[in-house]
Amino acid sequence: MPTVSIDQIKNPIAEELKGFEPFFRKSTKTDIPLLNSIINYILRRKGKQMRPMLVFLTAKLNGTFNTRTYHAALTIELLHTATLVHDDVVDESYQRRGFFSVNAIWRNKLAVLVGDFILAKGMLWSIEHEDYDLLQLISKAVGDMSEGEILQIEKARKQDIDEEVYFEIIRKKTASLLATSAAVGASSVSTDKEVISRMRQLGEFAGIAFQIKDDLFDYEKTNLVGKPTGNDIREKKMTLPLIYALSQSKNGEAKKIQKIVKKRIKSAENIEEVVNFVKANGGIEYAHQVMLDYRDKALNILADYPESDVKTALQQYIYYITDRNK
């Protein structure tokens, strides 16, 4: 499929997304001026809205778009926004999408509290509107994402991540939110558990492909992704290209690279050595192929659906994940 733009993917849900923007802003209003200022700062720097898009597309693929679909997208986007604020605190990151992060301007304490508030808003919204099925799915995602983050921190200390552990981490930390986005979209229009499970699987496969694509950015000479080449290596993160390369190398060479990765502070030469090692041992090619395999698994789930503009947009969405340059 030719490279597509976000605007092309949005075409079948353009009106729904247009209505979602004011709906989302209204839901985050508070009576506390400082909190409103921080939330407005966050919303002015919103991303591509990949998760609400997936909610809307899976809803329209499986039924008739309705108010509950807006509720599902709102809660997902609030959860995603909260996790970004918390992630910047955990990662000690002072930039987000080219701007100062919340913790860089208002410090960690306020950032954590704002993240908590946004997360609570989403949960309360589901309770107030008795969307208990959506809340159940989203609450599981919150638990999975926390477990995935903690597991990654634990394994980064020990440097004992193999492929099985790696996939457990990214399935929980990253893929769970896309999986839940697809599932709540279907759940907002259908009570068929098989349909909801099928959409959840589609989102999980797409989410795993999404994370592997992010892993590959770390080995490319580009700053388009908003982070320097080798950032994961600096943070001692064992990603798929490195894990595979270590498994393919001679023991002595592998130990030398692991020693570099474990170092608290790494020079540019250290990073270059690890990157060259991964490339020389086939880590890039292997991870790229695994990413495409997961992309194809997601696409195969759509195979039995009749042709429509929504199905085409979902296919484009999945291709976009693996073809993007940031």
Image: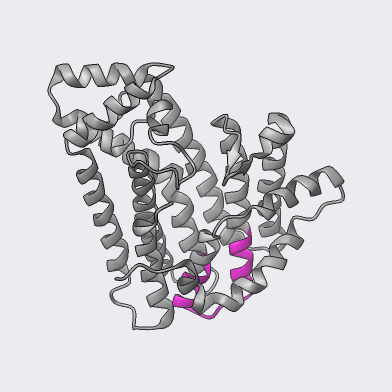
Image-based side of 213 in relation to 112, left or right: left
Q: Is residue 236 above or below residue 173?
A: above
Q: Is residue 114 above or below residue 31?
A: above
| Residue 191 showing in the rendered view | no
Q: Is residue 260 above or below residue 64?
A: above
Residue 142's x, y, as percent?
A: 54, 45
Image-based side of 113 in relation to 177, left or right: right
Residue 5's x, y, as percent?
A: 44, 68
Q: Is residue 235 above or below residue 209?
A: above
Color theme of the render: one colour
Q: Residue at x 87, y 50 (%)?
A: 31
Q: Toward the viewer: 243 or 172?
A: 243
Residue 193 belongs to magenta span: no
Q: Toward the viewer: 312 or 99?
A: 99
Check the picture and name the quadrant holding the N terminus: bottom left
Residue 113 falls in which quadrant of the image?
Answer: top right
Q: How many marks?
A: 0
State whether the magenta stretch is mostly helix, strand or loop.
helix
Q: Residue at x 59, y 70 (%)?
A: 69
Q: Which residues are magenta?
A: 55-74
Q: Residue at x 42, y 33 (%)?
A: 231
Residue 165's x, y, as percent?
A: 31, 35
Q: Residue at x 26, y 62 (%)?
A: 296
Residue furthest to the left = 250
Residue 203's x, y, as percent?
A: 40, 59
| Residue 92 showing in the rendered view | yes
Residue 63 belongs to magenta span: yes
Image-based side of 275 in relation to 156, left or right: left
